[in-house]
Amino acid sequence: MKTKIQENDKRQIIIVATTASMIEQFNMNNIKILKELGYGVHVGTNFKNPGTITNEISNGLIEKLTKLEVKCHQIDFKRGIGTPSANKRAFRQLCNIVENENISGIHTHSPLGSIISRRVAHKLGIKVLYTAHGFQFFKGGRLKDCGVKSRKRTKLIETIF
């Protein structure tokens, strides 16, 4: 039984999140597991506006990932729902990375990053896995989070692409 991927067949996976803090806080074990299984691992996120970590920690994250032989890609995601022009820019950036790096799968996190990642995967015909964090739309959730406006906003963002 073969558990590791042979070097010449090494598949490339990109982990995508809108902020570097999501990578730092939730995805380091995922990265290590993928590396142990023999995958080539890439991270696509906004290292310049890293979310709940400082720029210094974000720069340290890049160094840590580089030492693990993970290729880091800056994607100019905005927080929240972004803007149409910023979302299209992030979409183009991720498309270019997937095509240029021969990515065969995307593991995506965070709502906006996942909407964009799913659209890229659909356009380029590759596999995508979305890990949801937070579950805004669930029975018993805050009405404000699962209200009609919030659902319409998410649907609007998805239809832009």
Image: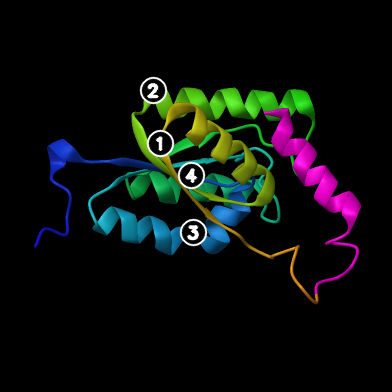
Amino acid on which the number 2 mark rests in the picture: Asn
Pointer 3 or 2: first along the chain: 3
**Spatial separation of the CA atoms under disc 4 and disc 1:** 26 Å
| Residues at circles 4 and 3 in contact by the CB criterion of under 8 Å | no
How many residues crowd mark 4 within 10 Å: few (<14), some (14–19), many (20+)? some
- Disc 4, disc 1: CB below 8 Å? no
Q: Which mark is residue 27?
A: 3
Measure how far apart labels 3 and 2 are at the Cα level. Answer: 23 Å
Q: Which residue is mark 1?
A: 126
Q: How is the image coloured?
A: rainbow
Disc on res. 7: none
What amino acid is labelled 1 in the image? Ile
Mark toward the start of the polypeptide (4 vs 2):
4
**Residue 100: numbered disc:** 2
**Residue 156 pos. (x, y %):** 79, 37
Q: Which residues are magenta?
A: 141-161
Q: Is residue 73 left or right of residue 147?
A: left
Of 19 and 1, nearer the camera is 1
Instruction: Give the amino acid type for the residue marked by disc 3 in the picture.
Output: Asn
Q: Dot 3: within a 10 Å radius of its alpha carbon, few (fewer than 14), some, or many (20 or more) residues?
A: some
Which tag, 4 or 3, sits closer to the chain's start?
3
Spatial separation of the CA atoms under disc 4 and disc 3: 13 Å
